[in-house]
Image (tube, rainbow, N blue to C red):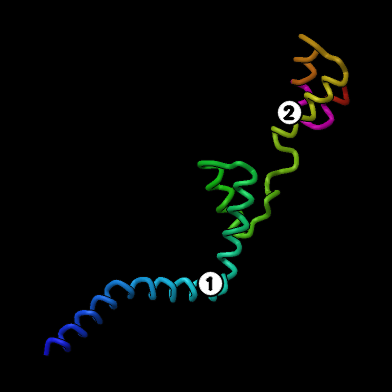
Amino acid sequence: MRRTTWVVAVGAALAVLGGPAVLAQAGAAAAAAKPANSQQEKMKSCNAEATTKGLHGAGRKSYMSSCLSGEAAAAKPANSQQEKMKSCNAEATTKGLKGADRKTFMSTCLKGPGSAASK
């Protein structure tokens, strides 16, 4: 009877101590063998792109939403205000404009296409 109790106690101890390790190995092997679905792949690539672009907060959330929904990354209009500002500023610098002349040029340039060319 003592021997049976001892064997049962040792078996129970092994099950308690070794069980989680065996289950963890089995779970890791199952996760490694399971292929990632397309949504997971899309999430990985969008997340990597957002990290590369250095996006945080609301900008990252907006980017991730549009990326995961399949919208094109270049969904902003080609002639956005920021793009206009860059091109007008570069043109004013090229022309060497300063002071009031630069201010007037920038105003007409930013109002619309062709405005700067007519002056």
Quadrant for the N terminus in the image = bottom left
Q: CA distance from mark 1 to mark 2?
A: 50 Å
Q: Of all residues shown, which one is farthest toward the front?
A: 3
Residue 110 sits inside the magenta stretch: yes
Magenta stretch secondary structure, dominant: helix
Q: Amino acid at mark 2?
A: Met
Which residue has dot 2 on it?
85
Horizontal and vertical percent position of residue 105: 80, 18
Query: Which residue is more in the foreground, 89 or 17?
Result: 17
- Amino acid under label 1? Ala
- Residue 113 is covered by the magenta coloring: yes
Task: Write the start and end of the magenta stretch as one range.
Answer: 107-115
Query: In the picture shown, does residue 96 fall above or below 73?
Result: above
Q: How crowded is the residue under tag 1: few (<14 C-alpha within 10 Å), some, or many (20+)?
A: few
Residue name at image x 68 percent, y 49 percent: 75
**On the image, which quarter does residue 19 sit in?**
bottom left
Q: In the figure, is residue 98 to the left or right of 47?
A: right
Image vertical order of residue 3 relative to residue 10, above or below: below
Residue nearest the viewer, comparing 48 with 78: 48
Q: Residue at x 88, y 18 (%)?
A: 95
Kindly identify which numbered label has been placed on residue 32.
Answer: 1
As helix, strand or loop, the secondary structure at mark 2 comes to helix
